[in-house]
DNA sequence: CTGAAAGCGCTTACAG
DNA sequence: CTGAAAGCGCTTACAG
């Protein structure tokens, strides 16, 4: 692989001049420029980003540590992060924590060792010392989706409170009174916030949220299945299960199906996070949709602002309820239409 | 951020000794070693991977360029690649080509500039000059899933031929005679191979594959929807649509649903690539499952073999048919059971 | 076992 | 406008 020296030799100039041409430095003669460009072309020269990074102390790379790539919500988030980063001239390296704190730390460490310019994290747990130290040490950092309290790091996330209230209103209107939730890990903000929003909304309707109706999940499908089985084993099972993410909803569907029961006839189901597949499940799943692409974009912009010396801004975007058929038909549309209408209602 | 010099100063040794300790070089006195280790600890020193890479000419990083991250098949592939790479001491940088050749080239170029040790590619198109040049120039490379003919690069992929034959046998047994396929881009191997395998299998049953029954898709959902609409507009629409990947099957489901039609009553559906969601769609979708994790693992092993000077091996693994309800009930199980049995049959 | 020194491929004041 | 030279943070023969 040819280096800048080879180009300089071929063009009959110094490496400094080659470097200037490559970096669009203004003070290069037209003649020198064209000779360098010709040499670059002839040799198929490509600058060594490693050497450039060592010298300039910037990698033009962002690290993104997400909780679980197999979760379509995070996949979409990752994609939107990459798109926006590319638009701003950055690459992104993704680390998949798989909801495991030690794997999260592994990726944070590796990314730091590679001297990424900034870090986007959706923290799996309360707060690893490694991440906190990095933040304190001045590594540009932004939290997406989930965050850690008490750390001076901008947060880009969706606020699901209003949508959870809309969901509970919807469920209440359908006559449901025994509502259960499959929560995420209490150590994550999204794990605890969604339960709190749910409890608060239930309170407005005078409905309780007994401990037996709070399933402890870990945001992965299996835990949704187990929590649902436990609900179904109760002397008085809930009428509705609200899964705090889409994968646990998938597990819940599995559990219901394995018992030979039907959604929504035997038990209703709703999920946090909307994904394309929810339109095609049996039945289509009522879900709370996050503005995922916007979150990714905003997170990158905040991080790049921070990296490039502009004040970064925290951003909170609203989620919205998408009603489908998994919680039952509204009274007005009792008889299922022969032609399934797209019956999809959105509320802010 | 402290450097090796700071550690050397703090430990009272030269940077060479620090480097030796860090790299587990045997010839270091126990005393020097412990002083260095103490200094490393005290300073919170972490080696700069950029500098190390420049010096050693290896990044211990693999590049993975996949066609579409949002496709669950590729997401799972990417995850398995990362896992195996991590186990072997490598990191991976993922580039999402989004089925766009120019984006694919962008990522290949960026990855090459970063001097990744090797490249794993699932080529979006016939063969970009950039990629071919890189292969010729000796960049360690392995193709996964899709490949390019006439290039001396190992290929790790699944052979779906037997499973496609099993699918056609299944469809024929259910009484279907008019079978259509939504193909992927002809420029990709998986795009053309799946059509060929399908045509060949149909031939064994004396069934034709008229041009009108070959929809041209691009492996993304929208194209599956459009192709299906065209099928449904035919004077004699097919009885079965076989989508050559899971996203186009999703689009097909959309199209059928939008017309107020039902799967499998009005039209049957099968897909290449099995994904967890197919169990929960309405109805569950009959699909051809690839050994995705094994493919990822094998691809990484082949690439690392190549990088580390061992002869890499091409690997072909069999796909298998997973029968669900989207093509109709077998005659023996005419009456749908009240309790939906997991009726899931596997054939090699 | 240890250190001084060269060198990986760049960029960038500095001097001309 | 141009080039010689220093230096980014490491690793590794080489000499002792």
Image (cartoon, coloured by chain):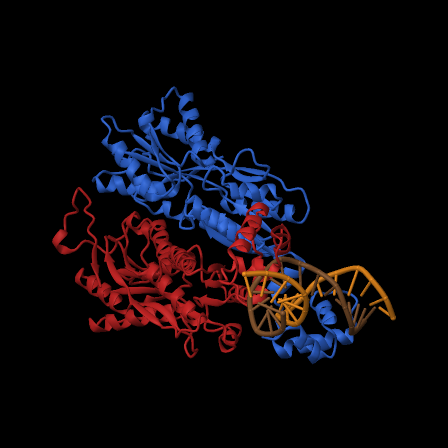
Chain colours: A blue, B red, C orange, D brown
Residue A314, placed above or below residue A296:
above
| Rendering coords of residue A96 (x, y %) | 45, 50
Q: Residue furthest left?
A: B332
| Rendering coords of residue A286 (x, y %) | 38, 38
Determine if residue B126 is in view.
yes
Quadrant location of the N terminus of chain A in the rendered image: bottom right
Residue A267: quarter of image: top left
Camera-side residue: A136 or A81? Answer: A136
Determine if residue A176 is in view.
no
Judge from the rendering whether residue A224 lies leftward or rightward of residue A16; answer left or right. Answer: left
Image point 38% across, 19% down: which residue?
A206
Residue B163, placed above or below residue A85:
below
Camera-side residue: A145 or A48? Answer: A48
Q: Residue furthest top?
A: A206
| Rendering coords of residue A347 (x, y %) | 47, 35
| Rendering coords of residue A132 (x, y %) | 55, 40
Residue B76: quarter of image: bottom left
Camera-side residue: A115 or A249? Answer: A115
Judge from the rendering whether residue A49 lies leftward or rightward of residue C13; answer left or right. Answer: left
Camera-side residue: A21 or B207? Answer: A21
């Amino acid at each position: 692989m040819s280096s800048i020296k080879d180009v300089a030799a071929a063009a009959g100039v110094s490496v400094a001049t080659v470097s200037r041409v490559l970096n669009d430095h203004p003070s290069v003669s037209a003649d020198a420029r064209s000779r360098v460009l010709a040499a670059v072309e002839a040799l198929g020269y490509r600058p060594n980003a490693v050497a450039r990074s060592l010298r300039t102390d910037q990698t033009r790379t962002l690290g993104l540590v997400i909780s679980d790539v197999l979760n379509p919500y995070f996949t979409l988030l990752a994609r939107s992060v990459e798109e926006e980063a590319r638009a701003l001239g950055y690459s992104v390296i993704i680390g998949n924590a798989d909801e495991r704190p030690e794997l999260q730390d592994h990726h944070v460490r590796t990314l730091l060792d590679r001297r990424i310019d900034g870090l986007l994290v959706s923290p799996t747990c309360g707060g690893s010392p490694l991440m906190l130290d990095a933040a304190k040490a001045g590594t540009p950092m932004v939290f997406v989706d989930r965050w850690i309290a008490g750390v001076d790091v901008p947060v880009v996330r969706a606020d699901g409170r209003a949508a959870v209230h809309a969901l509970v209103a919807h469920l209440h209107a359908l006559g449901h009174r025994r509502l259960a939730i499959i929560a995420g890990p209490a150590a994550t903000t999204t794990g605890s916030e969604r339960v709190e929003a749910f409890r608060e909304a239930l309170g407005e309707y005078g409905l309780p949220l007994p401990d037996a109706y709070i399933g402890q999940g870990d945001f992965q499908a299996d835990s949704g299945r187990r929590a649902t089985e436990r609900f179904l084993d109760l002397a008085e099972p809930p009428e509705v299960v609200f899964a705090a993410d889409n994968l646990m909803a998938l597990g819940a569907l599995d559990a219901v199906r394995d018992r030979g029961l039907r959604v929504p006839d035997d038990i209703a189901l709703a999920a946090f996070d909307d994904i394309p597949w929810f339109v095609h499940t049996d039945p289509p799943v009522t879900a709370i949709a996050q503005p995922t692409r916007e979150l990714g974009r905003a997170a990158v912009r905040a991080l790049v602002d921070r990296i490039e010396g502009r004040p970064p801004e925290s951003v909170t975007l609203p989620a919205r309820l998408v009603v489908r058929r998994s919680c039952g038909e509204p009274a007005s549309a009792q008889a299922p239409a022969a032609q399934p209408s797209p019956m999809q209602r959105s509320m802010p």
